Image: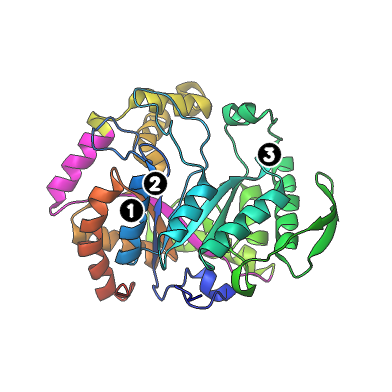
Amino acid sequence: MTLHAPKPTQANRNTFYSDNKFIIGLFGANCSSGRAVTLVEERWGGSWRESVALAQMADAAGIDFMLPIGRWKGYGGDTDYQGATLETFNWASGLLASTKRITVFGTIHAPLFNPIMAAKMCVTADHIGEGRFGLNIVCGWNEGEFEMFGVTQRDHENRYKYAQEWVDVVKLAWGPEDDFSYDGEFLHHARARAKPKPWGGSRPVIMNAGASDDGKAFAARNCDAFFTQAARDSVESMQARVRGIKADARALGRDLEIYTVGVVTCRPTMKEAQDYYHYAAVERADWSAVDSIMAIKGLTPENMGEEAFRVRRAQFANGMGGLPLVGDPDHVAGQLARLAEGGLRGLACSMVNYSLELPYFAAEVLPRLEQRGLRVAARS
């Protein structure tokens, strides 16, 4: 068997087998509408055929990873935003079998899946991709989704205590011992057996995006990649945030790379980009879905204040709050360069329609990042 990616050392896995100084991935393509809460007819469909075509396009363009959303129940609204979704481990396995170099993540709600089963699912996908699978661990927040499974969400502190035990068991299953037992506060596994192990003698890259102090501490202890909101005020404030998160990990003897999430609207001119952004994210936003999301999260003018509520509502209409990267290729490349200057290792981005917009982004923005020394040309 011939490896498509280089040897899967842990270092290679953690950098997505990439020589790029700034890593770029696609976020949310397993969901209908992706992350664009919009009514526009060209919004992303999220079908399997679209996913395969996009993954192969991204692979050829040198995009580093694809990250799915773990979504079990849509948000309603006029579009039933994210109402149709593809389960992420099956999605990842199929895409890994259809590509050569790109890393593909599976996203899993730890409280909803037995860790022994999850570890086996990861290993299966990892063998299909010959070491190109990654695991995104989420603890969950949407009570409506937990109700579907008959599971009660734990309080915030115990949520991450459980997640710690969960990832400990997964790592034991991936570890050198074929048989093991685990007796924790929440999890109890007697005479567990886990074969085969992850591909090539190293484990899948692990990521998390918890925003709370507990979430950040969990990532520092366990993860290789952590997603945080980009500071929008200055490069210096972003640098300070990144330094703080990385310092917490280094205090535990670990290296942690920091990423963020963005929404790309790139067109030949600034006016075209700004006009389309306003059209899709304001004029044709699915405001009923936005209001549903905010209600589920308990965000109201009464508990936030009118102005903060208005700003947050607009952010949700823009890719669920991702950093807006709107402009011509020079401007978008400059924005990405500022993120790199701020200490971020990379970006997971979404688009209104990935397949329609990625070719232009790849042809115009990626070469500009190469010229800045942040990317290398895609391998043929």
**Label 2: how many residues lie within 10 Å, few (<14), some (14-19) or many (20+)?**
many
The amino acid sitting under disc 1 is: Leu
Q: Position of residue 53 (x, y in %)?
A: 32, 53
Helix or strand or loop: what does disc 2 sit on? loop
Does the magenta run of residues contain 271?
Answer: yes
Q: Tell me which residue sits at (68%, 65%) in the image.
A: 196
Q: Is residue 371 above or below residue 266?
A: below
Residue 210: percent from the left, percent from the top? Answer: 58, 48
Circle on res. 123: none
Q: Is residue 171 magenta?
A: no
Q: Secondary structure beneath disc 3? A: helix
Are the residues at dot 2 and dot 1 in contact (C-beta closer than 8 Å)?
Answer: yes
In the image, is 285 to the left or to the right of 152? left
Measuring from the top left, give residue 212's x and y in whole percent: 60, 46
The label shown at residue 54 is 1
Q: At label 3, which amino acid type do we have?
A: His
Q: Earlier in the sequence, mark 2 or mark 1?
A: 2
Q: Contact, CB < 8 Å: mark 3 with mark 2?
A: no
Vertical arrangement, residue 181 with respect to residue 188, above or below: below
Tell me whether circle 1 and circle 3 mark residues in contact (CB < 8 Å): no
What residue range appears in magenta? Answer: 253-281
Q: Quadrant of residue 254?
A: bottom right
Of mark 1 and mark 3, the one earlier in the sequence is 1
Comparing 180 with 247, the one in front is 180
Q: Report the residue marked by disc 2.
A: 29
The quadrant in which the C terminus is found is bottom left
39 left or right of 243?
A: left
Q: Amino acid type of disc 2? A: Ala
**Closer to the eye: label 1 or 3:** 1
